[in-house]
Image (tube, grey):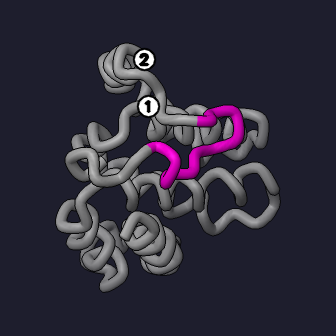
Protein backbone atom coordinates (compact mmCIF):
# COMPACT_ATOMS: atom_id res chain seq x y z
CA UNK A 1 0.00 0.00 0.00
CA UNK A 2 2.86 2.32 -0.95
CA UNK A 3 4.59 2.16 2.45
CA UNK A 4 1.49 3.18 4.40
CA UNK A 5 0.70 6.30 2.38
CA UNK A 6 -2.58 4.80 1.18
CA UNK A 7 -4.98 3.84 3.96
CA UNK A 8 -7.66 1.14 3.92
CA UNK A 9 -10.53 3.60 3.52
CA UNK A 10 -9.09 4.85 0.20
CA UNK A 11 -9.30 1.40 -1.38
CA UNK A 12 -12.53 -0.18 -2.61
CA UNK A 13 -12.76 -3.97 -2.64
CA UNK A 14 -15.39 -6.42 -3.97
CA UNK A 15 -18.68 -6.58 -2.09
CA UNK A 16 -18.15 -9.11 0.74
CA UNK A 17 -14.81 -7.56 1.67
CA UNK A 18 -15.17 -4.33 3.60
CA UNK A 19 -11.49 -3.79 4.37
CA UNK A 20 -8.12 -5.23 3.47
CA UNK A 21 -7.80 -8.86 4.63
CA UNK A 22 -5.71 -9.50 7.71
CA UNK A 23 -2.07 -10.40 7.35
CA UNK A 24 -2.49 -14.02 8.48
CA UNK A 25 -5.22 -14.66 5.91
CA UNK A 26 -3.16 -13.05 3.16
CA UNK A 27 -0.11 -15.17 3.99
CA UNK A 28 -2.21 -18.35 4.08
CA UNK A 29 -3.85 -17.70 0.70
CA UNK A 30 -0.50 -16.66 -0.76
CA UNK A 31 1.01 -19.99 0.26
CA UNK A 32 -1.75 -22.01 -1.44
CA UNK A 33 -2.46 -19.91 -4.54
CA UNK A 34 0.45 -21.47 -6.40
CA UNK A 35 -1.19 -24.90 -6.16
CA UNK A 36 -4.53 -24.11 -7.78
CA UNK A 37 -3.74 -21.24 -10.11
CA UNK A 38 -2.84 -23.30 -13.19
CA UNK A 39 -6.12 -25.19 -12.96
CA UNK A 40 -7.88 -21.87 -12.53
CA UNK A 41 -6.37 -20.62 -15.80
CA UNK A 42 -8.08 -23.48 -17.64
CA UNK A 43 -11.39 -23.03 -15.85
CA UNK A 44 -11.68 -19.32 -16.68
CA UNK A 45 -11.82 -20.07 -20.38
CA UNK A 46 -14.12 -23.07 -19.97
CA UNK A 47 -17.23 -23.31 -22.11
CA UNK A 48 -19.34 -24.45 -19.14
CA UNK A 49 -20.68 -21.23 -17.63
CA UNK A 50 -20.85 -22.45 -14.02
CA UNK A 51 -17.17 -23.39 -14.02
CA UNK A 52 -16.14 -20.08 -15.54
CA UNK A 53 -18.24 -18.15 -12.99
CA UNK A 54 -16.71 -19.98 -10.03
CA UNK A 55 -13.23 -19.56 -11.49
CA UNK A 56 -13.74 -15.81 -11.95
CA UNK A 57 -14.94 -15.47 -8.34
CA UNK A 58 -12.00 -17.47 -7.03
CA UNK A 59 -9.57 -15.46 -9.12
CA UNK A 60 -11.06 -12.17 -7.92
CA UNK A 61 -10.69 -13.02 -4.26
CA UNK A 62 -7.30 -14.66 -4.79
CA UNK A 63 -6.05 -11.35 -6.19
CA UNK A 64 -7.55 -9.49 -3.23
CA UNK A 65 -5.71 -11.74 -0.80
CA UNK A 66 -2.46 -12.26 -2.72
CA UNK A 67 -2.00 -8.65 -3.86
CA UNK A 68 1.48 -8.13 -5.33
CA UNK A 69 2.35 -11.85 -5.11
CA UNK A 70 0.42 -12.34 -8.37
CA UNK A 71 3.43 -10.84 -10.18
CA UNK A 72 4.98 -14.33 -10.18
CA UNK A 73 2.19 -15.68 -12.40
CA UNK A 74 1.51 -12.57 -14.46
CA UNK A 75 2.42 -13.85 -17.93
CA UNK A 76 0.15 -16.90 -17.76
CA UNK A 77 -2.54 -15.04 -15.87
CA UNK A 78 -2.85 -12.29 -18.45
CA UNK A 79 -2.98 -14.73 -21.36
CA UNK A 80 -5.79 -16.73 -19.76
CA UNK A 81 -7.79 -13.60 -18.94
CA UNK A 82 -7.60 -12.05 -22.44
CA UNK A 83 -10.11 -14.54 -23.80
CA UNK A 84 -12.52 -14.19 -20.92
CA UNK A 85 -12.61 -10.38 -21.00
CA UNK A 86 -14.07 -10.56 -24.50
CA UNK A 87 -16.98 -12.81 -23.44
CA UNK A 88 -20.30 -10.99 -23.57
CA UNK A 89 -22.70 -13.77 -22.67
CA UNK A 90 -22.34 -13.92 -18.88
CA UNK A 91 -23.03 -10.94 -16.60
CA UNK A 92 -20.98 -12.22 -13.65
CA UNK A 93 -17.88 -12.80 -15.75
CA UNK A 94 -18.37 -9.39 -17.39
CA UNK A 95 -18.27 -7.87 -13.90
CA UNK A 96 -15.51 -9.98 -12.31
CA UNK A 97 -12.82 -10.04 -15.01
CA UNK A 98 -12.54 -6.24 -15.46
CA UNK A 99 -12.44 -5.92 -11.68
CA UNK A 100 -9.63 -8.50 -11.60
CA UNK A 101 -7.67 -6.41 -14.10
CA UNK A 102 -8.25 -3.26 -12.05
CA UNK A 103 -7.01 -5.00 -8.91
CA UNK A 104 -3.96 -6.31 -10.76
CA UNK A 105 -3.27 -2.79 -11.98
CA UNK A 106 -3.59 -1.51 -8.43
CA UNK A 107 -1.34 -4.07 -6.74
CA UNK A 108 1.30 -4.77 -9.38
CA UNK A 109 3.92 -2.33 -10.56
CA UNK A 110 3.22 -1.09 -14.12
CA UNK A 111 6.80 -1.93 -15.06
CA UNK A 112 5.87 -5.61 -14.61
CA UNK A 113 2.64 -5.80 -16.61
CA UNK A 114 3.36 -3.01 -19.12
CA UNK A 115 5.80 -4.82 -21.42
CA UNK A 116 3.67 -7.98 -21.43
CA UNK A 117 0.53 -6.13 -22.44
CA UNK A 118 2.28 -3.95 -25.03
CA UNK A 119 3.80 -7.05 -26.66
CA UNK A 120 0.38 -8.68 -26.77
CA UNK A 121 -1.19 -5.57 -28.33
CA UNK A 122 1.51 -5.59 -31.03
CA UNK A 123 0.84 -9.33 -31.58
CA UNK A 124 4.42 -10.18 -30.65
CA UNK A 125 3.28 -12.38 -27.76
CA UNK A 126 1.03 -15.39 -28.45
CA UNK A 127 -0.07 -14.02 -31.80
CA UNK A 128 -1.43 -17.43 -32.83
CA UNK A 129 -4.54 -16.80 -30.69
CA UNK A 130 -7.18 -14.64 -32.32
CA UNK A 131 -8.19 -13.00 -29.04
CA UNK A 132 -4.75 -11.82 -27.88
CA UNK A 133 -4.57 -8.37 -29.48
CA UNK A 134 -8.16 -7.32 -28.85
CA UNK A 135 -8.28 -8.80 -25.35
CA UNK A 136 -5.01 -7.20 -24.35
CA UNK A 137 -6.12 -3.81 -25.64
CA UNK A 138 -9.28 -3.97 -23.56
CA UNK A 139 -7.33 -5.26 -20.56
CA UNK A 140 -4.80 -2.44 -20.86
CA UNK A 141 -7.50 0.12 -20.10
CA UNK A 142 -8.57 -1.67 -16.93
CA UNK A 143 -4.98 -2.22 -15.78
CA UNK A 144 -4.18 1.43 -16.32
CA UNK A 145 -7.35 2.53 -14.52
CA UNK A 146 -6.41 0.36 -11.56
CA UNK A 147 -2.92 1.81 -11.34
CA UNK A 148 -4.22 5.38 -11.68
CA UNK A 149 -6.98 4.81 -9.11
CA UNK A 150 -4.64 5.15 -6.17
CA UNK A 151 -2.90 8.24 -7.45
Disc 1 packing (10 Å; few <14; some 14–19; many ≥20)? many
Q: Kindly identify which numbered label has been placed on residue 51.
A: none
Above or below 82: residue 46: above
Determine whether the residue tagged by mark 2 lies in a helix, strand or loop.
helix
Q: Which residues are magenta?
A: 8-18
Of residue 100 and residue 127, the one placed in the foreground of this image is 100
Residue 66 in which image quadrant: top left
Give x and y (percent) for residue 150: 40, 64
Query: Which label's residue is closer to the chain start, 1 or 2?
Result: 2
Q: Is residue 53 magenta?
A: no
Residue name at image x 48 percent, y 77 percent: 141
Give x and y (percent) for residue 26: 38, 23
Of residue 77 and residue 68, the one placed in the foreground of this image is 68
Residue name at image x 43 percent, y 67 percent: 143
For marks 1 and 2, give the CA distance.
7 Å
Residue 70 in which image quadrant: top left
Above or below 64: residue 112: below
Determine whether the residue tagged by mark 1 lies in a helix, strand or loop.
helix
Of residue 72 and residue 135, the one placed in the foreground of this image is 72
Disc 2 packing (10 Å; few <14; some 14–19; many ≥20)? few
Residue at numbered disc 1: 65
Q: Is residue 16 magenta?
A: yes
Furthest residue toward bottom: 122
Give x and y (percent) for residue 34: 32, 25
Residue name at image x 52 percent, y 76 percent: 138
Number of disc labels: 2
Q: Are marks 1 and 2 in contact (CB under 8 Å)?
A: yes
Secondary structure, magenta segment, majority class: loop
Residue 101 lies left or right of residue 5; in this view the side is right
Residue name at image x 48 percent, y 34 percent: 20
Residue at numbered disc 2: 25
Amino acid sequence: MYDGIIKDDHVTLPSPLEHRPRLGARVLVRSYVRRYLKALFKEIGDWIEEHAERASNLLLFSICYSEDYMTHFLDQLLMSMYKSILKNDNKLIQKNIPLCFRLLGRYINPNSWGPLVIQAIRSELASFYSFTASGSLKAFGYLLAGSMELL
